[in-house]
Image (cartoon, helix red, strand yellow):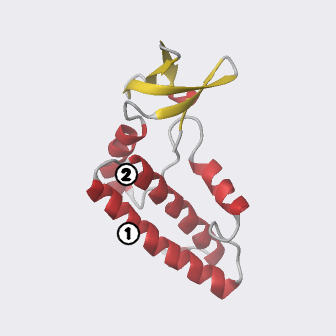
Amino acid sequence: MKSRHISILDFFKQLQVEYFCAELRYKIYTPQSDKDYWYTIMRHKKNKIEDISLRNNLVSIFSDKNEYEKISKEVLTFGIPKFVYRDYYQQTKLKNRDLYFYFQPGSDVKVIINEECFIGKILRYDTKENIVFVEIDNITHKLKFEQICRIV
């Protein structure tokens, strides 16, 4: 994101959202090369966030747990996380990988069934139908993406 087109506060918030997305990718992507890449991105964004925070006396996701939780809840909700992408090219390049690793079989998830929350494991998913098959207590449930939140 180019900072010259938005206010410093908007840029600061966007940078923190981007950091959280990089951290989420770092946690869900399994290849070590991906983990190394996202860790590097996280480190650069953290340095920039801390610099802006220090220069402008602002609380950040690193200095205030509530700020971190607020950003976390914006991005990581039930359904597909609200990943941010730099541009359309990056979106086309990363969106399928994000879904692949987010809904990776064997991953632990929270699920909502009839307004109750359960913990289960992803068995498989179907992006065309927007459904996930989750095992809870040895029973397979066919659920909509909106009923799933990955435990990271």
Q: Residue furthest bottom?
A: 55
Q: Position of residue 78 (x, y in %)?
A: 58, 35
Q: Tell me if I can see residue 35 in this picture.
A: yes
Q: Which one is closest to the eye, mark 1 or mark 2?
A: 1
Position of residue 133 in the picture relative to residue 15 (left or right): left
In percent of the image, x 58 and y 73: which residue is there?
6
Q: Position of residue 144 (x, y in %)?
A: 51, 23
Q: Residues within 10 Å of mark 2 (few under 14, many from 20)?
A: some
Q: Nearer the viewer, residue 119 or 19?
A: 119
The residue at which mark 1 appears reads as 40
In percent of the image, x 38 and y 29: which residue is there?
127
Q: Tell me if I can see residue 3 in this picture.
A: no
Q: Position of residue 8 (x, y in %)?
A: 62, 77
Residue 33 to residue 103: above or below: below
Position of residue 47 in the picture relative to residue 25 (left or right): right
Q: Quadrant of residue 131?
A: top left
Amino acid type at circle 2 is Gln
The residue at which mark 2 appears reads as 91
In percent of the image, x 52 and y 32: which residue is there?
109
